[in-house]
Amino acid sequence: MINIFIHIALLLIMPPLLLGVINKTKALFAGRRGPPVLQLYYDLFKLARKGVVISEVTTWVFTAAPVITLVAITLAGLMVPMGPFQSPIAFTGDLILFAYLLALSRFFTTTAALDTGSAFEGMGAAREVTFACLSEPALFFALLVLAKMSGSLVLTDMLHTPLTAGSQSAASLVLVAAGLFILLLAENSRIPVDDPNTHLELTMIHEVMVLDHSGPLLGIILYGAAVKLFVLSAVLLHIVFPFQSGSALLDWSLFVIEMLFTAVAVGVVESVMARLQMRNVQHLLIAAILLCGFGFVLLMR
Amino acid sequence: MNGLWMILTAAGLMMASGFPAGFGPRRSRTAQCLATVLLVLGSLTGLSGLAIVLFSSEPCALSFPWHLPWGSFSVGLDALSAVFLIPVFIVPALGSVYGLDYWRQSDHPDNGRGLSLFYGLLAGAMVMVVIARDAVLLLIFWEIMALAAFFLATAENEKPEVRRAGWIYLVATHTGTVCLLALFALLRQVSGSFALSAMDAGSLTSGVATTLFILTVIGFGFKAGIMPLHVWLPGAHANAPSHVSAVMSGVMLKMGVYGIIRMLTLLPVTEMWNGELLLSLGAITGILGIAFAIGQSDIKRLLAYSSIENIGIITMGIGLALIGRTLHRVDFILLGLGGALLHVWNHSLFKSLLFLNSGAIMHAVHTRDMNRMGGLAKSMPRTAGLFILGAIAICGLPPLNGFVSEWLIYLGLFQSVETGNGISWPAAGIGAVALAMIGALSLACFVKIYSTVFLGQPRFPNHSAPHDPKPLMHYPMFLLAAGCVVLGILPQLGLPLIQRAAAQWMDPSIQGSLLAPIQWISKAALVLIVVSRLIIALVRKKIRKQPGVSIGTWGCGYAQPTPRMQYTATSFGEMLVKRFRWALRPRTQRPVIASPFPHKTGFSTEVPDTVLDRMVLPVFQYTGRQIMKLRLLQQGRTEIYLLYMLIILLFLFCWESLGIGR
């Protein structure tokens, strides 16, 4: 029971911290001092108090979409186990609900973007749905590998299987981990796929879709994006760090440290890499399909 | 036995429903209302008959003493027929009510009467197809169904593109029927009768079994629209009146699916490759179907291609179940066939909803070209709300019904990966990945259609002041959308019947259940809806309390944006169309700029049907040219033809007397 409580608390409170860590890492590389680690929390509080500018063109989708997106992602987060603990929601087939909740959030993000009637937001939405057609197969290859190895269709069991997996499946897991890391970057609009800081609408994906949102709505979107980063990192961590100490306290602190480490890793990637040209993004995503797909092929022996 | 009689009565009522209108006065509103009342009455009779049969466990078959040529008039009802009967009783009735305002006989004196007549024939014939237990009887009603659909699809036959689509449909459906004739002839050869009853494995050699399987897939696949047999589908659906498209796509395609499942039920346990063939055909149909859909800018063509995609998903489920039958795996059969059958229901709900919706849109803007629409959510809010429900459902997203059936099929595919014993699991794994890709593509497709039609600003000034349709058009859509929500949150309501139907493929001694984890799905769906609704209410309250500024969309610094600069349907799909260029072969006409002061020019792009334009038509044209050579024999003079007859008769006499034939 206490573990479920910690799970929900971490899921709701910790995500903005990750973005703070990423930005701090990037600042460190650039030789700047950078914003405080808690900056996103401040931003969220500030946005919550502000008024909203709503375009006359929009309909109810524009205000509802950020909320539905956030709820869908949080619900998905309740199915992903953190560390060696059980997730609050676990049932046979939850992995598909997990993937489709992410898809639901994509449906509403892109619809809200198109609701404004802006050509730029249309571009962002078109890119988002196009790249998803490549990232979705990669995700499912990864899920297939985990299902085959664990012999289970419950996300908790599947993600815990690297804890006990023998060395013969290590190669698959390495490939899947690399593929999932690419997905993590792409799905959360990080460099090299997308640049969360640029202000050139022509070249963006996620940021351009939320150009017209403001005030609490923008706050919900930023928070939702942070939760998504947190949830997908939690998935990846199981494969990268399959450790378990046995003591609950130690495991939870280990999980938090791993999570912060992931944020640092993302920050490092963002600092040392340039953003890919838009036409090359698909090659990166195809690489993710190849990595997860070969992980699947290796299991066929 | 009463229940089956009621269903027979229902079929008769439905088939007869259009006759008073069909032979009545040209502009009579009363006649059209009478047709609808009779059709609805028939449907209600049928549904109550179905309820009686399902809740009493009496064996349900009737055979009449009078004989058809070769066959007998025998009908029956089991769980599988019941599953397919439910959409047949629901969708045409709703479509007919919708048609009262959508296609008023007084506005369409030329084709209104024919429409009423053939609409009833189509609906009633489909009932008979599903309950027929004799191959000849099935074929008779199959033909009535196919021909009624032809006359419905070509209602506006003064337009050349409608006639073209109609001819293509007619050729395609009869090619399918030829395969069915061969199939049933072979069936009789092997089993000794035209009765549709299970065959024992001993009487079949593997060659015959293979032929029967292939003929089934081709013959019924034409009607279902499995690629590459789908060539008739986009044109016929796009050019038919919208409530006819709804019935064709929502119900008539499913008759092909019914045929495949029914024949596979009769055939003894099959070989491994049969299931794998269906699985891969389904995956190809799904991916290419939805890719073609993304390339369309005609709203009804797009919906038609999306029907092909959904047939692909259903075929994948059947393929998985077939693999399960070969391997004696109950779970594959339950999840695969159960998912496929549930998807049959779901697709008949949301696709009919979307087609009826497209009719309302066309009434409002008088075009099918999405690139000329936009901003309709402001003027038609209820239509928009119903459309987005249908769009979420058809993308297979939670919390609506499309998710449940796709979830079952996914679960089956994953299960065969998880516990498969070496032969089947790689195929199933690739199936799961293909299904994921179909999901992502259909999301792109329906975001595109909803956004370009309903969101943003009108791209062209609309002089007809679009508004929500009248209640008679609105209520059927509302009922279909309600069905999507109910089956999404409470799939338990329908699953027992689906499970009974799927159990026909299983060894009766083994038990299995679809229902175990489904409660979680309904819980998650409820949580998603309730929590979202609460937070949205909170946010709205806050927004109202602190009124901000309300201005136009930020133009990114551009001073004079116009509505025509919005992303169009074509531009939204452009990246994906490029990705699938190898299959879609888009036709683009670019402006050539030759001088420093170029003239006014144009750019256009379209995605025609590759299979039809590049494969089927060339073959037909070539055949046509070759056959033209036979015109040498055609002199146009009666005495020459009589001479031919004399020659042939003499030849036959010689043949017989020389004993060559013996």
Image (tube, coloured by chain):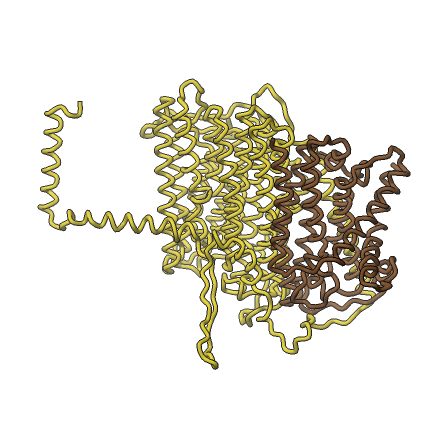
Q: Is residue A132 visible?
A: yes
B282 sits left or right of B69 in the view: right
Residue lying furthest bottom: B597
Residue occupying the point 15% across, 47% down = B633
Where is the C terminus of chain B found, in terms of image quarters?
A: top left
The percent position of residue A38, horizontal first and vertical second, equals 87, 58
Colour of chain A in the rendered structure image: brown
- Locate residue B139: give its quadrant: top left
Q: Position of residue B363 (x, y in %)?
A: 52, 62
Between residue B574 and residue B345, name the one nearer to us.
B574
- Camera-side residue of B349 and B555: B555
Query: Looking at this view, is B13 or B606 the one in front?
Result: B606
Q: Which chain is yellow?
A: B
Count of labels shown? 0
Residue B61 point in image, percent of width and height: 47, 25
Q: Is residue B479 visible?
A: no
Residue B613 in the image: state x and y as whole percent.
39, 53
Residue at 42% across, 59% down: B108
On screen, residue A153 versus residue A11, left or right, reads: left
Q: Within the image, what quadrant is residue B436 found in?
A: top right
For the view shown, which residue lies furthest in the right direction? A249
